[in-house]
Image (spheres, helix red, strand yellow):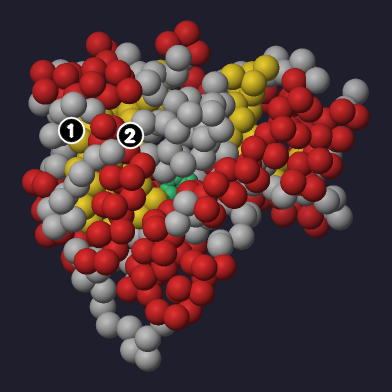
Amino acid sequence: MINPVLTDMAVYPFTRLEHERRRLLDAGVEVIDFGKGDPNEPTDPIIRQALVDALPERAPYPLAQGLPELREAATGWVQRRFGVALDPETEIVPTYGSKEAIFSLAQVLGTGGRVVAFGEPAYPVYERGALFAGARVQTLPLLRENGFLADLEQLDDDVALVWVNYPHNPTGTVAPPAFYDELAAAAERHDFVVGSDEAYTELWFDEPPPSALQAADRSRFVVFQTLSKRSSMTGYRSGFVAGSPAIVAALKAYRPTVGTAPQEFVQRASVVAWDDERHVEETRARYRAKRDVMIPAIESRGWEIVASEATMYLWVAVPDAGDVVDVLLERGVLVSPGEFFGPSGAGYVRFALVPTLEECERAAEILGSLA
Ligand SMILES: Cc1ncc(COP(=O)(O)O)c(C=O)c1O
């Protein structure tokens, strides 16, 4: 009686990494985990305090449209960060982190029997959402020679939804603003919706990356933002979807059925998070310090760091990725094989810079001591 989409699904790759982590810990090995992208950064005290202050005696069901204060704070942030004015009434809806909303978009749009396309290597949720919605999947290889940008010429004629994710997990690629205009033109030509997963726009080290919201024509775009990485709030579950009023209205109709509105005390803490940039600058500085330790250590092995302009990830081309993963594993350093994210990830490993700076320094020493 179980849905075959579920039974046919491969084990979530990170479950395997977790298994290895436990095995090493049981064997008494000190593990430095660059595997999963869950930030170990502290959530800023002003955000934690706002959560505590907002905890009511009784917490009623949160409404799908979210608190007006949160919609105002999020649209205010979009205006300051991207220079785009959104209507807080019609163009935004808060989400329970971004994963659940990414997962359900294919269902909300009614893509069943049509094609959902996305680049690979990729975050696995675009595919899973498409399969549960009964859509067909088209993967577009993201290759170094194309700057890890999808070739839009390859899109299937029956495409209903295209996912993009820049800054990109796992490669750390930033898309140029022109890419979003090309995407808007293709969406207009072929009549598809674009889901832009922007979980990593705030983890940058050079120039702030653009948003799909800045495209001249954003009428077919839906953008997914989250506090998980920007404000190290993965466990709070708080994000938003912004874009086309028709799709936002559909989400407001769909979401009460699923019950995925963030708790109001989390929404109030989120207002404080969107209103503050100091803690985000501090977060970027911490990731920058880790990059400054890890990049030379990785390069000193003769391995090449590719893309990796933004995000918390380093995408590393290595001569024999399988061996490198195993050698590092035996020394307690966990990294993800690039193939976890799709076949075009072969030949790469991904370092998620989530361990502490001290752990990164120890990992750098381990890299330096490898034969
Ligand atoms: C590319 C990408 N999108 C979305 C998410 C979802 O994050 P959350 O549901 O915490 O907002 C993640 C989390 O790792 C991610 O890597």
- The one nearer the camera, 290 or 118, is 290
Callout 1: few (<14), some (14-19), or many (20+) C-alpha neighbours within 10 Å?
many
Front residue of 330/242: it is: 242
Residue 211: mark: 2
Between residue 70 and residue 361, name the one nearer to us: 70
Image x and y of residue 93, in percent: 23, 56
Q: Which residue is mark 1?
A: 218
Residue 62 location (% of width, % of height):
26, 73
Neighbour tally class for label 2: few under 14, some 14-19, many 20 plus, Cα within 10 Å: many
Image quarter (top left, top right, bottom left or bottom right) of the C terminus: top right
Q: Are marks 2 and 1 in contact (CB under 8 Å)?
A: no
Quarter-wise, where is residue 348 in the image? Answer: top right
Left or right? Give the position of 261 relative to 339.
Answer: left
Q: Which dot marks residue 129?
A: none
Q: Residue at x 42, y 43 (%)?
A: 199
- The residue that appears at 15% across and 28% down in the rendered structure is 217
Q: Is residue 248 visible?
A: no
Q: Which residue: 49% across, 67% down?
A: 47
Q: Is residue 236 visible?
A: yes
Residue depicted at 64% across the width and 50% down the height: 18
Identity, as a three-letter code, of the amino acid under mark 1: Arg
Give amino acid for label 2.
Answer: Ser
Q: Is residue 342 above or below residue 105?
A: above
Q: CA distance from mark 2 to mark 1?
A: 10 Å
